[in-house]
Amino acid sequence: MSNKATYLNDELFGYLTENFGCDDEILTELKAKAIEAELPQIWVSPDQGKFLQVYLKSIRAKNILEVGTLVGYSAIVMAKALPEDGKIITIEKNEKFADFAESMIEKFGFSNKIEIVRSNARKWVRENEYSEYFDFAFIDADKPGYKVYLDEITPMLKKGGVFAADNAFAFGFLLNTAPERNPDKVRSMLSFNKYFRDYPGYDVSLVSIGDGLLLGVKE
Ligand code: DHB
Ligand code: MG
């Protein structure tokens, strides 16, 4: 029994990602191309990717909604864990990111499973009505908008579906009262963590993986 987590030093993190990471040839190439194209390297960590794959398989997820495609890394990671008829709708407002992700999704043969919607995600969730349709929602962009996404996407999730939000530790600055980077995003995450924890109809866990992953099951 312990009340403390094991601190992941660089050596343990190296062991974790080398042995239990999701990066195969495709994902390694995608990252190399994204770096070459000078796109932001803020994708989920390889161990978090593997966790998402195992988790999605365990809940037999079929329909996924993602907010924030970026380079397409997490969409492809998740698509690999879906059945043949599984589908991901991923929303991206930045044309440059969407163009890059689309080319990768085509190149690696995931166009049948992943649809990129080029839109402002807050607008999209307000205008689209899916009723108890998605098994899993993964929110990873527009930190100040997380509350809007939770409010708007909750009716779109099946009962037993899962709302997942990345960056619960706010890039490590969550408890820093004067963060040197992204103070607005940090404040948004601190506020959202509490909002989601106390949200009616969910049981929520903050999983200490990557930069912190909130997972809430809709009851
Ligand atoms: C940032 C955003 C992310 O979603 C992430 O996982 C890491 C960093 C950022 O905006 O800096
Ligand atoms: Mg993130």
Image (cartoon, rainbow, N blue to C red):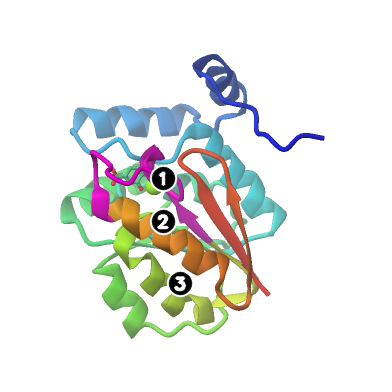
Disc 2 vs disc 3: which is toward the camera? 2
Residue closest to the far front:
177
Q: Position of residue 21 (x, y in %)?
A: 56, 30
**Up/down of 71 relative to 56, above or below:** above
Q: Is residue 106 left or right of residue 205?
A: left
Q: Is residue 57 left or right of residue 136?
A: right
Instruction: Confirm or deny contact between disc 1 and disc 3 (CB under 8 A).
Output: no
Give me the residue at 51% from left, 77% from top.
154
Q: Is residue 139 visible?
A: yes
SS type, badge 3: helix
Q: Position of residue 10 (x, y in %)?
A: 50, 17
Span highlighted in magenta in the image: 164-184
Give me the residue at 59% from left, 54% from top.
82
Main secondary structure of the magenta stretch = loop
Tell me if mark 2 has few (under 14), some (14-19) or many (20+) residues whose alpha carbon lies within 10 angstroms of its own: some
Give me the residue at 27% from left, 34% from top.
34
**Which residue in the protein does label 3 denote?**
150
SS type, badge 1: loop
**Which residue in the protein does label 2 denote?**
190
Tell me which amino acid carries mark 3. Leu
Give me the residue at 24% from left, 68% from top.
119
Instruction: Confirm or deny contact between disc 1 and disc 2 (CB under 8 A).
Output: yes
Q: Is residue 135 visible?
A: no
**Which residue in the protein does label 1 denote?**
175
Q: Which quadrant would the N terminus be assigned to in this image?
A: top right
Q: CA distance from mark 2 to mark 3?
A: 15 Å
Question: In the depicted view, which residue is nearer to us: 149 or 99?
Answer: 149
Instruction: Confirm or deny contact between disc 2 and disc 3 (CB under 8 A).
Output: no
Q: Which quadrant would the C terminus be assigned to in this image?
A: bottom right
